[in-house]
Image (cartoon, rainbow, N blue to C red):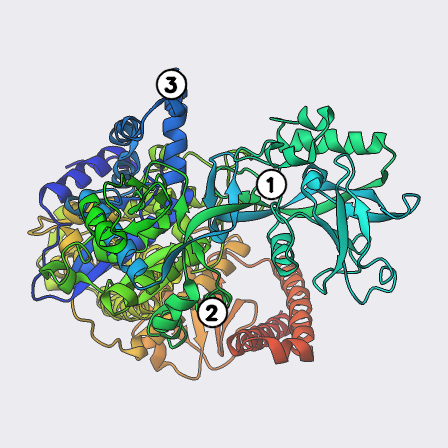
Amino acid sequence: MELSKNFEPQAIELKWMDVWNEKGYFKSVPDAREAYTVVIPPPNVTGVLHMGHCLNNTIQDILVRRARMMGKNACWVPGTDHASIATEAKVVAMLRERGIAKSSLTREEFLGYAWEWKEKYGGIILQQLKKLGCSLDWDRTSFTMDDDYYKAVIKIFVQLHQEGIIYRGLRMVNWDPASKTALSDEEVIFKEIDSKLYYVKYPLVEDNSKYMMVATTRPETILGDVAICVNPNDERYKAWIGKEVIVPLINRKIPIIADEYVDAEFGTGALKITPAHDKNDNEIGRKHNLKTIDTLDAEGKFTAEQLMDENPSAQILAYNGVDRFALRKQIAEDIAALDQIEKIEEYKGQVGTSERTGAVIESRLSLQWFVDMKAFLAKHPETLTTVMNDEITFHPTKLKNTYNHWLSNIKDWCISRQLWWGQQIPAWYDNSGNCVVAETEQEAIALYNSKFQIPNQQLTRDEDCLDTWFSSWLWPMEVFKGISNPHNEEVNYYYPTTTLVTGQDIIFFWVARMIMAGYAFKGELPFKDVYFTGMVRDKQGRKMSKQLGNSPDLLGLIDKYGADAVRFGIMFSSPAGNDLMFDEASLEQGRNFNNKLWNALKLVKMWEGRQSTDNSQQTTESNFATTWFENRLAQVQIEVDGLMAQFKISEALKVIYSLIWDDFCSWYLEWVKPGFEQPISANIYNKTIGFFEQLMQLMHPFTPFVTEEIFGLLKAQTESLCVKQFAQISNPKSEILVEAELLKQVITAIREARNKNQIKPKETIKLSIQTSNQESFNGIASILSKQVNAEAITFTNEAIANNIVVAVEQDKFFLQAERAVDTVALKAELEKDLAYQQNFLQSVLKKLSNERFVQNAKPEVIEFERKKQADAEARIKTIEESLSSL
């Protein structure tokens, strides 16, 4: 079979994904093996594959494929999240294109369109994961709006309500005016913006020639002001406390109150209190029994509804329906026209924005459903202790502190959303507002009749749906029907899951809540290890986004470079928890590596027809090479096992990469390569094929397609690489590893010396070695001779004049070329090298003499610097000796 010049990934990737799925290699059923369970962080049903998904799912696939090859029963569950806010926005946009307003539809009609959209677009991202090579058990695909899953969410809501953990209350919430729904604190992203600080005059009632100056960034809320608050210890305002001032435009009289919450150093030290539009203002308002006046509606537009008893002017009524940001400008202009704005300053401030829509959040007083988090955690303290005690291990561990801080300062979780796409809240109300909570309408009616005993009442179900995270916190359990069908065979086998791979940006949204749910509803942890990926950024360190235009087309990259190259590139520089600076050059490196593997395959297959059963063809260098590589391979396998156990996945990839590129391709294949048109020992050839197979097995979890293809081409195989079990590893022999490292150093140094002195590769040299340990060269002399093209190797006890001198550790190597060496040029080169080495040594000594560096650097870093010092000193000594002999 003739192999193509370069590895061509596209056709090969399609072929192998079909083969793997047809043979059912990714399917899992409970059996006697140890389970290795991973549940995918369910991407939004609206989603398409991007670089963050690529990183996250590549890591999961590496772990799952490796577990499968270690003999574990690997089960990786795919699925999607219904994503209430994002999906409803997509459906509303679709309806708008068809000329249909959501407001014109019943709930049932709208949900019909939502399911239509989901069926058309909702599985795109899962299909795209196949292009990436993800070995998911596709038969287990779950969706958070599946019937059983939906019922499980409702069941948990009812249970927590019965326990008094879920309650309904009128509270300040984060309000998204774009999607017109409440959000939890974790769904609010704070951004710094350029704003303005308006200094507004509030005239004193008893003497309107005097005024209280208030600095505000939000003039649009002034008409809802009910007080001015100052710090009781602020000497400037002590005489003002208890007096009244007049609100501009509305002419409302409001009191000046005192509270230590006010920062006397900010602005003018006086704070306007608008309880309907700020959480802190609301707290002060409740503390001082102040009225609440709401002047913005659900869309963030002005409404005069609560001002009508104050007989607002035509000017104020004209604000009705004006958007809050246009209103800000208009009210500022109108107050300025009254000469009640002293000045306006530029101001940089933080504003909360909706994670989903990007809209600036409003604080709004709203009747919503909440989870009482302090009560919940009091019943399930393991949520915190299990992480802090490393029963659940975070990678990196530093995120334990982030987790601890959030749980220690947790607020109640607002779980109701003013949306239709999602699990509808199982609460029913009568005309008087009496409420019952039950799993079904029939149960609700029965409960209402027994609780209130009011005949012939029509009950109406709550219109709102539940926060998406209230369903996804059940994910590790309910994908195995652990809530809807407790204690079934699958949940007993697969739960707790083994490893969770997720982004640290959802440590609160999802990770913490899954741990809460695990202890609350299963009585045990949901997973044993959590690997947190960093954020994928561009080369300039910027977050990738469509707005910046710096987010590459992942599917386009896969088409261009191949999935293996993309996986390689994104993993090569991705340590746990640290952000990844994405550079397309890393994908080129991945493609080059695949071509390196392909070229190695072509080289080895060229030898297939040149095998000889004559043992005399098995040379000394071949025997040394195979013995060394067998031990080197074992050494790396042990190292990789250790790194993977610590979730140092990027480091493991680099170790395997170096083993293949350097040790196997650059050294081993060169050492065993037969001469031109010469035979190769069948034994050496078969050992080489065996080594190549083991390398492909080591590399397979990282780059599954190219390794599976090469594995199948090396020889006729009885099994697929993706299910081939790792063999037991024997301990490597350190002696031969040390010997081989010395050989590589010597070959490299002599080749550099040949090149520097313009000795062509075809020119032979005579090589003399000055060493105190001649035995160390006896086993490698033939390889050394072959690799540096030396016609003879001798040993000497003293320096040889007019030779090229090379030093490696304590040994010296004297090179004599076929033609005479230009001693003048050699001396000049040596003097140049000596100056460089002396300068280099001084830079190392300067670093080692820096006390701060020595105290703070890691021991291995200091040791590396000391080795550089010793190497430089040895090199200087050798150069000086060489110069003295010329």
Residue drawn at point x = 18 percent, y = 49 percent: 711
In front of the other: 500 or 347: 347
Say which label, 3 or 1, has the lower sequence index: 3
Q: Mark 2 to mark 3: distance in Å?
A: 47 Å
Tag in front: 3 or 1 = 1
Q: Amino acid at mark 2?
A: Asn
User: Which residue shows up at 13% across the image and 46% down it?
Assistant: 609
Q: Secondary structure at mark 3?
A: loop
The residue indicated by pointer 1 is: 294
Disc 2 element: helix
Q: Label 3 sits on what residue type?
A: Ile
37 or 116, which is in the foreground? 116
Task: Examine the rendering and report whether any part of residue 676 can be seen.
Answer: no
For residue 125, which quarter of the picture? top left
Cβ–Cβ under 8 Å for marks 2 and 3: no
In space, the residues marked 3 and 1 are separated at their CA atoms by 31 Å
Q: Which residue is mark 2?
A: 404
Read off the residue under disc 3: 100
Sequence-wise, the earlier of marks 1 and 2 is 1
